[in-house]
Image (spheres, rainbow, N blue to C red):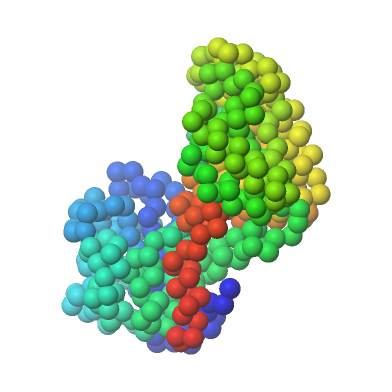
Amino acid sequence: MTFKTLRDFDLKGKTILLRADLNVPAKDGVVTDTTRIDRLKPTIDWLVQHGAKTVVLSHFGRPKGGFEAEFSLAFLTKDLQESWGVPVSFGKDCIGSDALALVQSLQPGQVCLLENLRFHKGEESNDPIFTKELAKLGNIYINDAFSAAHRAHASTEGLAHLMPTGAGFLMEAELNALHNALESPKRPVVAIVGGAKISTKLSVLDNLVRKVDVLFLGGGMANTFLFAQGVEVGKSLCEHDMADEARKIMKTAQDSGCEIVLPSDRVILKEFGKNAPHTICPTKDVPADQEAVDIGPDSIALLRNKLTGAKTVLWNGPLGVFEVEPFDKGTNEAARAVAEMTSGGTLVSVAGGGDTVSALEHAGVADKFTYVSTAGGAFLEWMEGKTLPGVAALNACKSAA
Ligand code: AMP
Protein backbone atom coordinates (compact mmCIF):
# COMPACT_ATOMS: atom_id res chain seq x y z
CA MET A 1 0.00 0.00 0.00
CA THR A 2 1.44 3.31 -1.06
CA PHE A 3 -0.95 5.98 0.10
CA LYS A 4 -0.07 9.07 2.10
CA THR A 5 -1.29 9.49 5.65
CA LEU A 6 -1.96 12.42 7.94
CA ARG A 7 1.68 12.35 9.00
CA ASP A 8 2.82 13.24 5.47
CA PHE A 9 1.21 16.68 5.34
CA ASP A 10 2.04 20.08 6.72
CA LEU A 11 -1.42 20.83 8.10
CA LYS A 12 -0.88 24.18 9.80
CA GLY A 13 -3.47 26.69 8.69
CA LYS A 14 -4.69 24.34 5.92
CA THR A 15 -8.33 23.46 5.43
CA ILE A 16 -8.81 19.71 5.52
CA LEU A 17 -11.80 17.98 3.98
CA LEU A 18 -12.17 14.98 6.27
CA ARG A 19 -14.41 12.26 4.86
CA ALA A 20 -15.76 10.47 7.91
CA ASP A 21 -18.43 7.80 8.19
CA LEU A 22 -20.98 9.26 10.59
CA ASN A 23 -23.66 6.91 9.37
CA VAL A 24 -24.07 5.80 12.97
CA PRO A 25 -26.92 3.74 14.43
CA ALA A 26 -29.53 6.13 15.84
CA LYS A 27 -33.08 5.91 17.15
CA ASP A 28 -35.42 8.89 17.57
CA GLY A 29 -32.54 11.32 17.09
CA VAL A 30 -30.32 9.62 19.67
CA VAL A 31 -27.09 7.85 18.74
CA THR A 32 -27.25 4.27 20.03
CA ASP A 33 -23.63 3.34 19.36
CA THR A 34 -20.85 5.93 19.20
CA THR A 35 -18.07 3.55 18.11
CA ARG A 36 -17.66 5.12 14.68
CA ILE A 37 -17.50 8.61 16.21
CA ASP A 38 -15.07 7.59 18.94
CA ARG A 39 -12.74 5.90 16.50
CA LEU A 40 -12.29 9.17 14.62
CA LYS A 41 -10.86 10.91 17.69
CA PRO A 42 -7.16 10.20 16.97
CA THR A 43 -7.57 11.82 13.54
CA ILE A 44 -9.41 14.83 14.97
CA ASP A 45 -6.85 15.22 17.76
CA TRP A 46 -4.00 15.21 15.24
CA LEU A 47 -5.72 17.75 12.99
CA VAL A 48 -6.55 20.05 15.90
CA GLN A 49 -3.10 19.77 17.46
CA HIS A 50 -1.43 20.51 14.12
CA GLY A 51 -3.44 23.67 13.56
CA ALA A 52 -5.63 22.42 10.71
CA LYS A 53 -9.08 23.79 9.98
CA THR A 54 -11.18 20.64 9.79
CA VAL A 55 -14.28 20.27 7.65
CA VAL A 56 -16.02 16.97 8.35
CA LEU A 57 -18.01 15.44 5.47
CA SER A 58 -20.29 12.42 5.77
CA HIS A 59 -23.40 10.73 4.49
CA PHE A 60 -26.22 9.54 6.73
CA GLY A 61 -28.87 7.05 5.70
CA ARG A 62 -30.32 6.88 2.24
CA PRO A 63 -32.03 10.17 1.35
CA LYS A 64 -33.23 10.48 -2.23
CA GLY A 65 -30.89 13.30 -3.28
CA GLY A 66 -32.55 16.31 -1.60
CA PHE A 67 -33.05 17.58 1.96
CA GLU A 68 -35.00 15.24 4.25
CA ALA A 69 -35.12 16.26 7.92
CA GLU A 70 -34.84 12.69 9.20
CA PHE A 71 -31.45 12.34 7.49
CA SER A 72 -29.97 15.65 8.63
CA LEU A 73 -26.62 15.39 10.40
CA ALA A 74 -27.43 18.39 12.64
CA PHE A 75 -28.35 16.17 15.62
CA LEU A 76 -24.84 14.73 15.75
CA THR A 77 -22.84 17.80 16.78
CA LYS A 78 -23.48 17.16 20.49
CA ASP A 79 -22.10 13.60 20.29
CA LEU A 80 -19.15 14.72 18.20
CA GLN A 81 -18.26 17.43 20.72
CA GLU A 82 -18.54 15.02 23.63
CA SER A 83 -16.41 12.37 21.96
CA TRP A 84 -13.83 14.63 20.32
CA GLY A 85 -13.60 17.22 23.11
CA VAL A 86 -13.74 20.21 20.74
CA PRO A 87 -16.57 22.55 19.68
CA VAL A 88 -18.10 21.47 16.35
CA SER A 89 -20.04 24.05 14.31
CA PHE A 90 -22.60 22.95 11.74
CA GLY A 91 -23.16 24.01 8.14
CA LYS A 92 -26.63 23.53 6.66
CA ASP A 93 -25.27 22.54 3.27
CA CYS A 94 -22.13 20.77 2.14
CA ILE A 95 -21.51 22.98 -0.90
CA GLY A 96 -22.33 26.55 -1.96
CA SER A 97 -21.88 30.00 -0.48
CA ASP A 98 -23.10 29.19 3.06
CA ALA A 99 -20.76 26.22 3.32
CA LEU A 100 -17.88 28.33 1.98
CA ALA A 101 -18.61 31.17 4.44
CA LEU A 102 -18.61 28.76 7.40
CA VAL A 103 -15.40 27.09 6.25
CA GLN A 104 -13.70 30.45 5.72
CA SER A 105 -14.64 31.52 9.23
CA LEU A 106 -12.76 28.57 10.78
CA GLN A 107 -9.59 29.34 12.73
CA PRO A 108 -6.68 26.86 12.94
CA GLY A 109 -7.63 24.04 15.30
CA GLN A 110 -11.37 24.49 14.74
CA VAL A 111 -13.78 21.86 13.43
CA CYS A 112 -17.06 22.05 11.55
CA LEU A 113 -19.47 19.43 10.25
CA LEU A 114 -21.31 19.97 6.97
CA GLU A 115 -24.77 18.63 6.16
CA ASN A 116 -25.39 15.17 4.69
CA LEU A 117 -23.54 14.77 1.37
CA ARG A 118 -26.37 12.64 -0.01
CA PHE A 119 -28.72 15.64 -0.02
CA HIS A 120 -27.07 16.21 -3.41
CA LYS A 121 -27.51 13.61 -6.15
CA GLY A 122 -23.97 14.38 -7.33
CA GLU A 123 -22.51 12.63 -4.29
CA GLU A 124 -23.63 9.15 -5.25
CA SER A 125 -23.26 9.69 -8.99
CA ASN A 126 -19.71 10.96 -8.41
CA ASP A 127 -20.64 13.99 -10.49
CA PRO A 128 -17.56 16.04 -11.47
CA ILE A 129 -19.35 19.38 -10.94
CA PHE A 130 -20.46 18.43 -7.43
CA THR A 131 -17.00 17.07 -6.66
CA LYS A 132 -15.43 20.35 -7.79
CA GLU A 133 -17.81 22.28 -5.53
CA LEU A 134 -16.67 20.15 -2.59
CA ALA A 135 -13.01 20.53 -3.53
CA LYS A 136 -13.35 24.34 -3.50
CA LEU A 137 -13.84 24.15 0.26
CA GLY A 138 -10.42 22.84 1.22
CA ASN A 139 -6.72 22.33 0.51
CA ILE A 140 -6.23 18.66 1.42
CA TYR A 141 -8.58 15.66 1.31
CA ILE A 142 -8.26 13.09 4.06
CA ASN A 143 -10.34 9.94 3.72
CA ASP A 144 -11.05 8.29 7.06
CA ALA A 145 -14.15 6.38 5.96
CA PHE A 146 -13.04 2.84 5.13
CA SER A 147 -16.61 1.70 5.70
CA ALA A 148 -17.72 3.82 2.71
CA ALA A 149 -14.71 2.92 0.55
CA HIS A 150 -16.63 0.30 -1.45
CA ARG A 151 -18.59 3.15 -3.03
CA ALA A 152 -17.16 5.29 -5.84
CA HIS A 153 -18.89 8.46 -4.70
CA ALA A 154 -17.74 12.07 -4.99
CA SER A 155 -16.53 12.25 -1.39
CA THR A 156 -15.06 8.73 -1.25
CA GLU A 157 -13.38 8.57 -4.64
CA GLY A 158 -13.84 11.68 -6.81
CA LEU A 159 -12.12 14.14 -4.48
CA ALA A 160 -8.92 12.09 -4.52
CA HIS A 161 -8.44 13.03 -8.17
CA LEU A 162 -8.72 16.75 -7.50
CA MET A 163 -6.74 17.38 -4.33
CA PRO A 164 -3.71 16.29 -2.35
CA THR A 165 -5.02 13.15 -0.68
CA GLY A 166 -4.23 10.94 2.24
CA ALA A 167 -5.69 8.43 4.68
CA GLY A 168 -6.82 9.29 8.19
CA PHE A 169 -5.68 7.16 11.12
CA LEU A 170 -8.85 5.04 11.14
CA MET A 171 -8.56 4.24 7.43
CA GLU A 172 -4.88 3.47 7.93
CA ALA A 173 -5.59 1.16 10.88
CA GLU A 174 -8.34 -0.68 8.95
CA LEU A 175 -6.16 -1.15 5.89
CA ASN A 176 -3.17 -2.32 7.90
CA ALA A 177 -5.31 -4.80 9.86
CA LEU A 178 -6.95 -6.19 6.74
CA HIS A 179 -3.66 -6.37 4.88
CA ASN A 180 -2.04 -8.27 7.76
CA ALA A 181 -4.98 -10.67 7.96
CA LEU A 182 -5.41 -11.65 4.34
CA GLU A 183 -2.86 -10.15 1.94
CA SER A 184 0.35 -10.96 3.79
CA PRO A 185 -0.69 -12.82 6.93
CA LYS A 186 1.38 -14.86 9.32
CA ARG A 187 0.43 -18.48 8.66
CA PRO A 188 -1.38 -20.68 9.38
CA VAL A 189 -4.49 -18.56 8.79
CA VAL A 190 -7.87 -19.78 10.08
CA ALA A 191 -11.04 -18.13 8.79
CA ILE A 192 -14.20 -18.53 10.86
CA VAL A 193 -17.33 -17.80 8.88
CA GLY A 194 -20.89 -18.08 10.12
CA GLY A 195 -24.17 -16.35 9.43
CA ALA A 196 -27.41 -17.33 7.90
CA LYS A 197 -26.85 -18.12 4.25
CA ILE A 198 -24.09 -18.94 1.81
CA SER A 199 -25.87 -17.10 -1.01
CA THR A 200 -24.89 -13.73 0.50
CA LYS A 201 -21.29 -14.82 1.05
CA LEU A 202 -20.46 -16.93 -2.00
CA SER A 203 -17.73 -14.60 -3.24
CA VAL A 204 -16.34 -14.26 0.28
CA LEU A 205 -16.08 -18.04 0.66
CA ASP A 206 -14.66 -18.48 -2.82
CA ASN A 207 -11.92 -15.95 -2.12
CA LEU A 208 -11.17 -17.22 1.38
CA VAL A 209 -10.62 -20.85 0.42
CA ARG A 210 -7.98 -19.67 -2.05
CA LYS A 211 -6.11 -17.73 0.63
CA VAL A 212 -6.50 -19.30 4.07
CA ASP A 213 -5.28 -22.62 5.46
CA VAL A 214 -8.40 -23.60 7.39
CA LEU A 215 -12.00 -22.45 6.93
CA PHE A 216 -14.26 -23.24 9.89
CA LEU A 217 -17.92 -22.90 8.97
CA GLY A 218 -20.76 -22.45 11.45
CA GLY A 219 -24.20 -20.85 11.50
CA GLY A 220 -26.95 -21.61 9.05
CA MET A 221 -24.52 -21.74 6.16
CA ALA A 222 -22.83 -24.85 7.56
CA ASN A 223 -26.12 -26.67 6.92
CA THR A 224 -25.92 -26.01 3.21
CA PHE A 225 -22.43 -27.49 3.08
CA LEU A 226 -23.53 -30.51 5.12
CA PHE A 227 -26.58 -31.00 2.89
CA ALA A 228 -24.27 -30.80 -0.16
CA GLN A 229 -22.31 -33.69 1.34
CA GLY A 230 -25.48 -35.74 1.77
CA VAL A 231 -25.84 -35.15 5.53
CA GLU A 232 -29.39 -34.91 6.96
CA VAL A 233 -30.05 -31.37 8.22
CA GLY A 234 -33.68 -31.83 9.25
CA LYS A 235 -35.64 -28.58 9.44
CA SER A 236 -32.48 -26.48 9.79
CA LEU A 237 -32.06 -23.32 7.75
CA CYS A 238 -30.55 -24.65 4.53
CA GLU A 239 -30.32 -23.35 0.97
CA HIS A 240 -30.96 -26.58 -0.88
CA ASP A 241 -30.59 -24.85 -4.24
CA MET A 242 -27.06 -23.76 -3.35
CA ALA A 243 -25.70 -27.28 -2.94
CA ASP A 244 -23.83 -27.11 -6.26
CA GLU A 245 -22.23 -23.83 -5.26
CA ALA A 246 -21.19 -25.35 -1.93
CA ARG A 247 -19.65 -28.31 -3.77
CA LYS A 248 -17.76 -25.91 -6.07
CA ILE A 249 -16.33 -24.11 -3.05
CA MET A 250 -15.31 -27.43 -1.49
CA LYS A 251 -13.54 -28.37 -4.74
CA THR A 252 -11.73 -25.01 -4.91
CA ALA A 253 -10.69 -25.47 -1.29
CA GLN A 254 -9.31 -28.91 -2.03
CA ASP A 255 -7.37 -27.61 -5.05
CA SER A 256 -5.98 -24.74 -3.00
CA GLY A 257 -4.96 -26.81 0.02
CA CYS A 258 -7.54 -25.23 2.30
CA GLU A 259 -9.19 -27.50 4.86
CA ILE A 260 -12.90 -26.85 5.32
CA VAL A 261 -14.00 -27.78 8.84
CA LEU A 262 -17.70 -28.25 9.57
CA PRO A 263 -19.26 -28.50 13.04
CA SER A 264 -19.07 -32.00 14.54
CA ASP A 265 -22.10 -31.56 16.79
CA ARG A 266 -25.16 -29.34 16.88
CA VAL A 267 -27.63 -27.84 19.28
CA ILE A 268 -31.04 -28.99 18.03
CA LEU A 269 -34.66 -28.30 18.88
CA LYS A 270 -38.21 -28.75 17.69
CA GLU A 271 -39.71 -25.35 18.49
CA PHE A 272 -37.48 -22.29 18.41
CA GLY A 273 -37.68 -19.67 21.21
CA LYS A 274 -35.77 -18.16 24.11
CA ASN A 275 -34.57 -20.95 26.41
CA ALA A 276 -36.53 -23.44 24.29
CA PRO A 277 -35.95 -27.11 25.20
CA HIS A 278 -32.99 -28.38 23.18
CA THR A 279 -30.48 -31.21 22.99
CA ILE A 280 -27.05 -31.76 21.53
CA CYS A 281 -26.36 -34.40 18.91
CA PRO A 282 -23.60 -35.38 16.50
CA THR A 283 -23.93 -33.45 13.24
CA LYS A 284 -24.84 -36.55 11.25
CA ASP A 285 -27.74 -37.37 13.60
CA VAL A 286 -29.99 -34.30 13.27
CA PRO A 287 -33.53 -35.78 13.19
CA ALA A 288 -35.79 -34.89 10.26
CA ASP A 289 -38.22 -32.98 12.52
CA GLN A 290 -35.61 -30.80 14.30
CA GLU A 291 -33.43 -27.85 13.44
CA ALA A 292 -29.83 -26.99 14.34
CA VAL A 293 -29.50 -23.51 15.83
CA ASP A 294 -25.97 -23.54 17.24
CA ILE A 295 -22.75 -25.49 17.27
CA GLY A 296 -22.15 -27.85 20.20
CA PRO A 297 -19.26 -28.35 22.68
CA ASP A 298 -17.44 -30.88 20.48
CA SER A 299 -17.38 -28.36 17.66
CA ILE A 300 -15.89 -25.76 20.00
CA ALA A 301 -13.19 -28.26 21.01
CA LEU A 302 -12.60 -28.95 17.32
CA LEU A 303 -12.28 -25.24 16.58
CA ARG A 304 -9.90 -24.77 19.53
CA ASN A 305 -7.82 -27.59 18.13
CA LYS A 306 -7.67 -25.96 14.69
CA LEU A 307 -6.74 -22.65 16.33
CA THR A 308 -3.79 -24.21 18.13
CA GLY A 309 -0.71 -23.05 16.31
CA ALA A 310 -2.66 -20.62 14.12
CA LYS A 311 -1.05 -17.21 13.72
CA THR A 312 -3.95 -15.33 12.14
CA VAL A 313 -7.72 -15.53 12.50
CA LEU A 314 -10.25 -13.80 10.32
CA TRP A 315 -13.87 -13.86 11.51
CA ASN A 316 -17.17 -12.99 9.92
CA GLY A 317 -20.64 -14.02 11.04
CA PRO A 318 -22.13 -15.67 14.16
CA LEU A 319 -21.94 -19.47 14.55
CA GLY A 320 -25.49 -19.83 15.83
CA VAL A 321 -28.65 -17.81 16.45
CA PHE A 322 -26.67 -15.68 18.93
CA GLU A 323 -29.47 -13.15 19.47
CA VAL A 324 -31.50 -15.70 21.46
CA GLU A 325 -30.22 -17.40 24.63
CA PRO A 326 -28.82 -19.97 25.10
CA PHE A 327 -28.11 -20.33 21.39
CA ASP A 328 -25.41 -17.69 21.71
CA LYS A 329 -23.19 -20.18 23.50
CA GLY A 330 -21.27 -21.50 20.48
CA THR A 331 -20.50 -18.01 19.20
CA ASN A 332 -19.59 -16.78 22.71
CA GLU A 333 -17.24 -19.65 23.43
CA ALA A 334 -15.56 -19.52 20.04
CA ALA A 335 -15.12 -15.74 20.39
CA ARG A 336 -13.66 -16.15 23.86
CA ALA A 337 -11.23 -18.80 22.60
CA VAL A 338 -9.97 -16.43 19.89
CA ALA A 339 -9.80 -13.53 22.38
CA GLU A 340 -7.84 -15.64 24.86
CA MET A 341 -5.26 -16.64 22.25
CA THR A 342 -5.04 -13.07 21.03
CA SER A 343 -4.37 -11.84 24.58
CA GLY A 344 -1.73 -14.53 24.91
CA GLY A 345 0.11 -12.79 22.08
CA THR A 346 0.11 -15.83 19.79
CA LEU A 347 -2.61 -14.72 17.42
CA VAL A 348 -3.57 -11.78 15.22
CA SER A 349 -7.37 -11.70 15.09
CA VAL A 350 -9.40 -9.54 12.74
CA ALA A 351 -13.19 -9.52 12.64
CA GLY A 352 -15.87 -7.52 10.91
CA GLY A 353 -18.89 -7.33 8.65
CA GLY A 354 -22.61 -7.39 9.37
CA ASP A 355 -23.61 -8.89 12.70
CA THR A 356 -20.07 -9.84 13.67
CA VAL A 357 -19.35 -6.76 15.76
CA SER A 358 -22.55 -7.12 17.79
CA ALA A 359 -21.92 -10.87 18.21
CA LEU A 360 -18.43 -10.17 19.59
CA GLU A 361 -19.73 -7.36 21.78
CA HIS A 362 -22.42 -9.71 23.05
CA ALA A 363 -19.68 -12.23 23.89
CA GLY A 364 -17.86 -9.43 25.76
CA VAL A 365 -14.64 -9.75 23.77
CA ALA A 366 -14.83 -7.19 20.96
CA ASP A 367 -12.01 -5.19 22.57
CA LYS A 368 -9.83 -8.27 22.95
CA PHE A 369 -9.47 -8.97 19.24
CA THR A 370 -6.49 -7.40 17.48
CA TYR A 371 -8.86 -5.45 15.27
CA VAL A 372 -12.62 -5.30 14.88
CA SER A 373 -13.70 -3.44 11.79
CA THR A 374 -16.71 -1.14 12.00
CA ALA A 375 -17.24 -1.54 8.27
CA GLY A 376 -20.05 -3.77 7.00
CA GLY A 377 -20.26 -3.89 3.21
CA ALA A 378 -16.72 -2.64 2.70
CA PHE A 379 -15.33 -5.37 4.97
CA LEU A 380 -17.22 -8.06 3.07
CA GLU A 381 -16.20 -6.70 -0.33
CA TRP A 382 -12.61 -6.65 0.84
CA MET A 383 -13.02 -10.29 2.00
CA GLU A 384 -14.30 -11.04 -1.48
CA GLY A 385 -10.95 -9.84 -2.79
CA LYS A 386 -12.43 -6.82 -4.54
CA THR A 387 -10.54 -3.59 -5.05
CA LEU A 388 -12.42 -0.91 -3.14
CA PRO A 389 -12.70 2.30 -5.21
CA GLY A 390 -12.01 4.54 -2.21
CA VAL A 391 -8.84 2.65 -1.41
CA ALA A 392 -7.73 2.46 -5.04
CA ALA A 393 -8.13 6.24 -5.30
CA LEU A 394 -5.94 6.73 -2.22
CA ASN A 395 -3.22 4.61 -3.72
CA ALA A 396 -3.50 6.21 -7.16
CA CYS A 397 -3.14 9.68 -5.69
CA LYS A 398 0.06 9.19 -3.78
CA SER A 399 1.90 11.73 -5.89
CA ALA A 400 -0.81 14.37 -5.81
CA ALA A 401 0.45 16.20 -2.73
P1 AMP B 1 -25.27 -12.93 8.37
O1 AMP B 1 -25.85 -11.56 8.30
O2 AMP B 1 -25.32 -13.70 7.11
O3 AMP B 1 -23.89 -12.93 9.03
O4 AMP B 1 -26.23 -13.76 9.33
C1 AMP B 1 -26.42 -13.47 10.67
C2 AMP B 1 -27.63 -14.21 11.15
O5 AMP B 1 -27.44 -15.59 11.01
C3 AMP B 1 -27.91 -13.97 12.62
O6 AMP B 1 -29.09 -13.23 12.73
C4 AMP B 1 -28.09 -15.37 13.19
O7 AMP B 1 -29.20 -15.49 14.04
C5 AMP B 1 -28.26 -16.22 11.96
N1 AMP B 1 -27.87 -17.62 12.18
C6 AMP B 1 -26.71 -18.08 12.64
N2 AMP B 1 -26.74 -19.41 12.79
C7 AMP B 1 -27.96 -19.83 12.39
C8 AMP B 1 -28.60 -21.10 12.33
N3 AMP B 1 -27.97 -22.23 12.68
N4 AMP B 1 -29.87 -21.14 11.90
C9 AMP B 1 -30.52 -20.00 11.55
N5 AMP B 1 -29.96 -18.78 11.58
C10 AMP B 1 -28.69 -18.68 12.01
Residue 71 spot, x, y in % from top left:
26, 53
The residue at 52%/49% (across/down) is 203
The residue at 76%/44% (across/down) is 307
Q: Locate the N terminus and report the quarter of the image it occupies.
A: bottom right
Is 171 rendered above or below residue 182?
A: below
Report if residue 343 is visible in the image: no
In front of the other: 272 or 368: 272
> In which quarter of the view is residue 185 placed?
bottom right
The residue at 75%/28% (across/down) is 298
Q: Is residue 8 left or right of residue 134?
A: right
Report if residue 161 is visible in the image: yes
Is 123 rendered above or below residue 208?
A: below
Q: Is residue 57 left or right of residue 229?
A: left
The residue at 51%/52% (across/down) is 380
Is 304 rendered above or below residue 113?
A: above
Picture mark count: 0
In front of the other: 378 or 16: 378
Residue 202 spot, x, y in % from top left:
52, 44
For this orientation, the residue located farthest to the right is: 309
Is 164 rendered above or below residue 329?
A: below
In front of the other: 149 or 7: 149
Residue 142 spot, x, y in % from top left:
43, 74
Q: Is residue 115 left or right of residue 146?
A: left
Residue 122 spot, x, y in % from top left:
25, 67
